[in-house]
Image (spheres, rainbow, N blue to C red):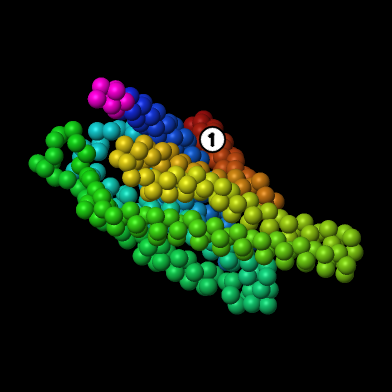
Amino acid sequence: MSNLTTSTLNNTSTDDDTMALATKMHWVSSVVFGSIFMVIGLTGNCLAVMVWRRKSMRSSTGTYLIAQAVADSGLLIFFFITDTIKMIWPEITTSYAYGSFFSYVGYPIFFLFVVCSIWMTVGVTVDRYIQVCWIMHAKTMCNDKKAYTGIGIITFLCFIVNLPHFMTFEPIADDMRSPDAAAFSYTDFGAGEGSMRYEFWVHCMFLVLVPWATIFILNMLIIRRVTKTNKRMEEKRSSFASEKVKRSESQITRILLTVTFTFLVLIALQCITQCFFMLKEAKGDRRIINEAFSVAKLGIVINSSINFFLYCLTGRRFRKELCYILFRNCSRSRFYMRESSTGDSNSSSVDKSKSSMTGSSKF
């Protein structure tokens, strides 16, 4: 009996140490890295939208990438509100107003942006697949109108799939809890088997498995088609023209593959951890895996923060348009400053001439 008690105490101590380590990792990933990537990501996404909105860059692919940048920005903002701010200021969780916001807006909308961001990547891949592999249908299927329709359908379906998250938490009134307790908790659905089955069989599969398979298959088909096209061009064109076409097509392929495969790598940690969390049944283990899942969400945040830099690294045309925007604004600022200083000097000269004329009239 004493050995059993000692074993139980040792297990409890181990669980407490592991939980403390998981909580510390959660704080570092959420407050330190989360804040840094949020600032970088919001800045990069704004610049990306400015570039893709330019007339010279306007296309159905650019429209999808703008929608993805918007979804990524929303994800970063709501990650900060629902995760980072709780770690920086734990007392906010005791506020009934924050509890209501977290339950009905913050938590479900964060996951809505997560799903939308992922499926916008699928939309970009499908759009590029049509333009590369279905060239005869590209003009009718890849335009702004069809892109807006596709974005609307993706957003609507993501909202429908995400509806159970609006029923996962509920606020708790001040008179129904202690002053130090959180102002929100799981609903009967959120704490039950229905939510567990939804998270594993619907959310995980729709969030990861189907996008993974779709993006991977389409990328392989795109690479195959581009390779065949390059070989055909080498036979029909001069070496210079062939090399030029190859560089142009390879640039598009690099941008697409870099963005999509980076997404697959960064989302993998979140997927594995969440699935492991769903399969665990021990209460103590669930608490630890729940904190680990909070750390794994950093992969989603990073993925939403680095697309701008991937565009810059792999897209020469994107870099060119970005430099034009930045240097044009700098040139305008210098022009206005120069005009202002010139105007001041001219007005000063006029004032001096007026004063001299006034002085001479006195005599």
Where are the magenta residues, as a range?
1-9
The residue positioned farthest toward the right in the image shown: 238
**Residue 11 visible in rendering:** yes
Q: Which residue is mark 1?
A: 348
Q: Nearer the viewer, residue 51 or 325?
A: 51
Rate crowding at label 1 as few (under 14), some (14 to 19) or many (20 or more) other CA atoms within 10 Å: few
Percent across and percent down for residue 39 are 47, 40
- Amino acid type of disc 1? Ser
Left or right placement of residue 327 versus residue 71 in this view: right
- The relative height of residue 284 versus residue 211 in the rendered view (above or below) is above
In the rendered structure, the answer to whether residue 352 lies left or right of residue 252 reads left
Residue at 59% from the left image edge and 71% from the top image edge = 142
SS assignment at label 1? helix
Residue 195 higher or lower than 94, as above or below = below
In this orientation, does residue 354 appear? Answer: no
Q: Main secondary structure of the magenta part?
A: helix
Q: Front-most of 120 and 215?
A: 215
Q: Is residue 324 left or right of residue 304?
A: right
In magenta segment, residue 335: no
Give the quadrant of residue 172: top left
